[in-house]
Amino acid sequence: MARKPETLIPKLALAICIMTSISVFAEEIPGSKLQNRSSASFSTPRSQGEIKGVVRDESGETLPGVNVLIKGTSTGTITDVNGDFVLNADNNAILVFSFVGYINKEVPVGDQTQIEVVLLSDTKALDEVVVVGYGTMKRSSLTGSVSTIHAKKIETFPSVNVMDAMQGQAAGVYISPSRQPGEEPSIRIRGSRSLSASNSPLLIIDGMPGSWDNLVSSDVESMEVLKDAAATAIYGSRAANGVILVTTKSAAKGINKMTVDIGSFVGFNQYNFIKMQSAEKYAELIRDVMRYQTHGAVNTEAWENSHIDTRTGMGMFHATWANNYYEKGVNYDWQKALFNESSFIQGHNVSISNRTDKLNYRISYNFQDNNSYYKTVNFKRHVLNANADMKINKWLNIGTISRLSLRRNSGWPDNMWDNMRRMSPFETPYIDENPQNPMKDAVGKEQYVNALWNYEEGHLLDNRGGEMADIILKADVNPLKWMKFTTNLKFDYHNRSRGIYRDSRTSYQNLGLNFGSFEKSAESNITWNGILNVDHTFNNKHQFMGTAVVEAIRSNFESLGASSQDIPAQYMGFHYLQTGIINRNIWSSFRKSTLMSYMFRGQYEYMGKYLLNVAVRADGSSRLAPQSRWRTFPSLSAAWVISEESFMADQRVLTNLKLRSSYGEVGNQAIDPYQTLTTLSQDTYNWGNDGVFTWRPSGIANKSLGWEVSKTWNVGLDYGFLNNRFTGSIEYYHTINEGLLTQRKLPDATGFSVIWQNIGESVNSGLEMSLTSRIISKKDFDWAVTGMVSRNKNKITGLTEGRDDRSNVWFIGHPIGVVWDFKKTGIWQVDEVEEAKLYNMQPGEIKLVDRDNDFAFTDEDKFIIGQREPKVLASIQNSMRYRNFDFSFNLVGQFGHYITAGNYTAEWNADKYIIDAIDWWTPLNPTNEWPRAHTAQSHRFSSTLSIFKGDFIKVQSIAVGYNPAKLFSGMKMNKMRVYVQASNPLYPYKAAPADVNPEQPNTMYTIPASYVLGVNLNF
Amino acid sequence: MFLVLTLISDSQIIMKNIILSGFFLVLLAGCQDFLVEESRSQMTEDYYNTEQGLYQGVAAVYSNNRLLYQQNMFRVNYYGDIVENASSMNNSYAESSDVAWGTLNELFRDIHKGIMIANRLEKIIGDSPTDRTREVYLAEIRGLRAHYYQIQVELWGKYGHYQEQVFTEFDESMLEINQKPVEFFYTQILSDINYAIEKLPAKAEVAEFGRLTQGAAKALKARFLLAIAGYSHQEYSTETEYNLYSKVGYQSIESVYQEAKSLATSVINDYGYSMESEYSKVFDAHNKLSNEVIWSIQWTTEKMFNTTPQYFHRPGVGRTNETLKMHVNANGSVTASTKSLLVTRLKDDGNLFDYVMPAHSMYYGREYRHIMPNFSWITMYDDSDKRKLANFETVYLKIDDDKSAPRSMTDTVCYMPLRAITPAEEKYHDDWVASKDPKAYYLDGMNEVFDMDDPNSEHYGGPLKQRSRYYSIKKFFDRSRVEMGKQEEGHANAIVIRLPEMHLIVAECNWKLNLGDNAVYEALEPIWMRSFNNLSEASVYKKGAVDLDFILDEYQREVGLEFNTFFILKRTRSLVARIKKNNPKSKEEAADNILRWRDYVKNEHYIKPLPIMQVNAFRNVTPDMLPPGYDYGRR
């Protein structure tokens, strides 16, 4: 009877309907047998004697869920959550220990009653299962370029966005971190390639399109970054920027017991402020502006004998300030008054999971609370994650994943930097400079609104809410052992709202009329796919794997908003907009797009040595013109596992060596829908005082808009040597990006300004290397280091009419995103006055290279100074464990690029408060660094002052943990870890000046350094 | 067993259902309709085929004018003979001859956007409109198209672009510039404006103020004819457009002036326009429906209909919170620097306090120190000419805050007489202010703004170097703004043509037709009657025989800077000479060799540079298709 199902299964494949009755037996018998077996192992101890034991991994961690079987029998047990097992066995019995990812171990019982077993992890990592598009594969079967990030690396990183934690974790992935909680960081895989369309990778969570917004790092099991076309082609039109596949956690394998995980951290964000000039220095700046006004820039003698001292100069410039500073001693620190130096953060999560034969589930809840240097900012998010899988019968599994999130965050006054610079240190926020008095409305020479009003209760509301529901239903049907049909249906709904109220006394309204608006939008997407996977091995030599997919996606977006001004009472905020009598506006929108795809992938493996993979995907998108709507994206890849060859059998050095090569094409269609219609846009006019709406042509149809296509060659070498003590890979890629969606500038004479066309072409090529080493792997001491380095070369190879596009700063033969500017050689000095005149310049102004020697500075004189994206990304991840202590730190570095720092180019003149780093020119201070100070205007060519090399090395994360679980052993706790972690705490090296953050050079302050104290419990 | 079988069949059914529904979904999804774009929050051009759509399309051509007149029609007219760049050194005069000057690029863009809407609507209406409403629409869009093409042909001459085809999708031919000779453009312009004159209703029949009327079309045509006549200037004798009149259907130059004169006369007599009693009333932002206005671009106090651009630029307002200080340099020249405008005043409670004027205010203007009136414009007016004080601000009264108007009309903070002051006067006022007398005020003189050291010097009247503070140009104040001093949105209309220009045109034609000086004076009489308390005072301007400068001076006194300065100087071929004469450089600027418009201006500037952005957008432009005298870099 026991063998019957196996003989029946092939027949099942031939005639499912006829076999229904037979399959009854097929279902019945193995199921009951399985039950018998498991009940036997738990309930029928033999007499030979009880053996107790514990199973650990090489790091000393106990291993729960290990199968312990008496060889040659079906008797056995499973280790419990503490790795302990109890079993009755003969003296001559041999125990077989097996566990996924570890090498089986056989231990003769002998006269032992207490056995301690250490399982070695399977160094070939042959069993590691990697998620690939629409299925999984053993890592050894991969022919494409896939980087994996494990949960452990990111789960405690205290940012609300998982992307922040990913920095430096995968080779070739460039992340620029978020500054504010809730702000989405930008991510680039192997650099930018598209000129105008999106450069962000596709995010797939649990097999379906997902969002970073409701993804919590403690729910992430692993992330795979698909980089080459062999890996991404299966996502076709959306894959040109790479694909990130996230698998969320489900109940741990092998545990038949409810497990509870709790994680919590509290801490603070720390901000590095820009050093602003002191009141003394500001007074000197004003004095020098006044001296310049009076004596000009050339007359050094007049400057030396000037009657204008700081007091006089201030008096000339602004009598009130002079009076305040010199008579009343006013020297107010607005920066301190306006910004938090640190802010509180916390995060908590709890999860409950269990796995039985029939059902496994995991439910988790996560809460995060984060703040900013802006006092108006608060970010709170709740995420509820639940997944369950049910085994209905032998051939049918159904499951569901649902992720519900609730987000509330408040915004910041985004022009505060400018506003703060108008807040003179010679004035306080209070009327008559008396702190007992109420606050002033306006401050400074231009009577700009007192920036502190932004923070008064109810003055500035920017309340953003988001409710997201992602629900996935899935069913796996296994009609045959080697065949699986999966269908997934995902419904996601994202409700967003944003309410804004800006009082008259905010930096937005600047004492004008107040403003309120409220907008609500709803986005709903339905994704359905049907996946057929087959996996069959013939003669233990030929393995065939195949996947066929049909997928359809429909996205809908609707929004409604309203605004008005002059709302009668502040407490109404944005909730009573119809009372605002001025500038009432209402708007709504609708967007819909669809994507239809067919995909096939086949893989053949011979003896695990030679691998060949073919994938084809056809995509049709509603966003594109009908005749170019469909495209097929093919890929072909092959791998040769050299280490499996017989000639490699005798050597002990190389454990694994695999050579991979692939070619494939993928697409990008990430532009707004409706580019293929000629549209009108609404405008207004008035006859006398009677308003009228008008309609003018605004967008011209492009009926031949097609896909962007990236064609990628990739060669990779995976290696592991010295028993996989060292593992890693080297990749080389070359991508040609064709038909880049470019907004072509049209002659305005057509009545239109731009049109999207598939014009541009760019090339990306690069090298990625990673090396992981378990340097020390002892019971009490572990030390593992991973290093990664990648070099991406990007250049534009084609543009409209084959010409450089200076207005977009695109140059053929150069990377996308370059700094193109004049080159400053110094400052015109007094003795160069005659030469300066030839350029219509004066001493004290910026001196430039005149490339074409025409005594004028035009675009012809500009240089391509360097690229904005780093040439080289590097990272080192260190993790150490000594007994119950663990210690880890990550370093990331970016090199070879240029940044431009807005703080240095922001108008600096006597009207504004400026950064301390500026040491302006005067005839008495003939520096070549900074030009002279002005009255109110900005400098010509001042952008040359803000260009810096971007190179840096950053400590991205540093953490120390302690596991005191033994202290709590009575509490049935499996794991406890107490840790302190710092993220982004410092830059040991940066090429840019101290007050420029190389990762966010254009903003006021740095990305936060966060310090948290946390605990993780598992019981 | 049976039960088990049923259960299994059930799950079998589930499986079947899954597979079937999957299959069904595939079929459904495979349906071609799935990928069809569904557009709801878009308006497509079919809308123009409806009555309302057509009405709103015609209104869009008007709305397009806001783009032109917001600031670019201002800026292109800065570079004439009556203003100087104000304190901002960055707005160098060099920009106007820069091929990358944004002003010209935007003008080119907006002119053609307007033309393309007009062309599209013309195609929909057709050559023979089916009803009177459509006939008027056609007349309006043709009149507006003539207006656009005329601006283009005067700015860029034969280097401009002519566009007939209406594009509905990308077409390679749209990438090519279609240059035409000046006569071609004027032939089209005259054909369009003639249709407009023939079909447009008169002012009295037009309920919607701001629409083109027959009178406005005639006024425009009078301007166009004077421009056509301008190509008969001797300097054009080697150019193809010389004696343009003969190429566009006129027998003689006299017939051109005759027609211009009769058009202007008709506008004066036939449509009920009348001049305001006071010059300043014309520019009152609240006086939107003035009967003096023949055609204006509209803005409104209703923010919802005041969308982008929300105002017209107010360029000539100086800083109101500074006073001027004279410093005598070693070489004897005078420099002025600015000093905070602080006086002592009395609070209601009797205590003294320091008062500083706001830099921006709803009353004295949202300051943009881009241009300032030059010495020659100010001195072009006789003191008895009421337009002088109506054009230049001389008294700054205390205002409570940037939103208010002065409460007390006697509380002067600063007085800027239109004359030089003596060092003694300055000292007297400085000491007075220093004494903290709550009635004390500052005195600023013209010699603190302009070089007035030596009347015989070539530098006389040149602007001093540091001049944040100058005589604000009052006609561009917008006191209808309600929110704050720094508010951008304004409600004042941009007046394109007003009645006095018709009198000026008659005067110009009478002079050109050699009808004698008296005929010229008589034509100007209505203007002078308003400008002087007593008409006989106007004789100050009647020095010697009427000549070009006399005509131009009167244009500048009356309509100076009103979007037409460059065009008047161009048609009279006097741009270069007038700039060299009226824009001297001060001694100190000359010493520092600061380049001014007089140093840059040359004959090539009668044709503006074709903007490089446009040149690059076309793919057939070769160097010989570009106006000479400008630096287009390596091409």
Image (cartoon, coloured by chain):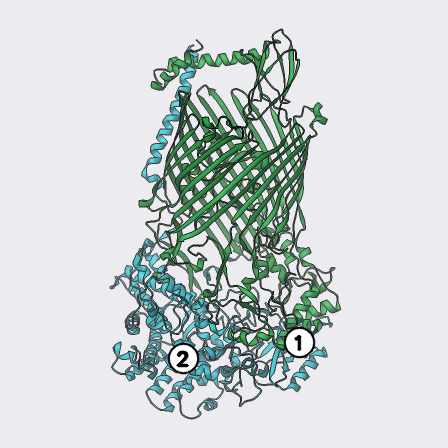
Give the residue pinned by disc 2: B569
Kindly report the distance in space between the C-alpha atoms of the residues bearing marks 2 and 1. Answer: 44 Å
Percent position (x, y) of residue B143?
A: 33, 69
Instruction: State yes or no: discs 2 and 1 in contact (Cβ < 8 Å).
Output: no
Picture residue at 56% right of the left edge, 36% below the top: A772
Residue A154, picture quadrant: top right
Give the residue pinned by disc 1: A303
**Chain represented in cyan:** B
Q: Name above or below for residue A206 compared with residue A106.
A: below
The chain to which mark 1 is attached is A
**Chain represented in green:** A
Return the residue nearer the eye: A424 or B201.
Answer: A424
Q: Say if labels 2 and 1 share a chain.
A: no
Question: Is residue B194 toward the left or the right of residue A708 in the image?
Answer: left
Amino acid type, residue under disc 1 in the picture: Trp
Number of callouts in the render?
A: 2
Q: Name above or below for residue A88 compared with residue B187.
A: above
Question: Dot 2 lies on which element?
Answer: helix
Q: Quadrant of the N terminus of chain A?
A: top left
Q: Quadrant of the C terminus of chain A?
A: top right
Amino acid type, residue under disc 2 in the picture: Leu
Return the residue nearer the eye: B204 or A502.
Answer: A502
Q: Name above or below for residue A503 compared with residue B39.
A: below
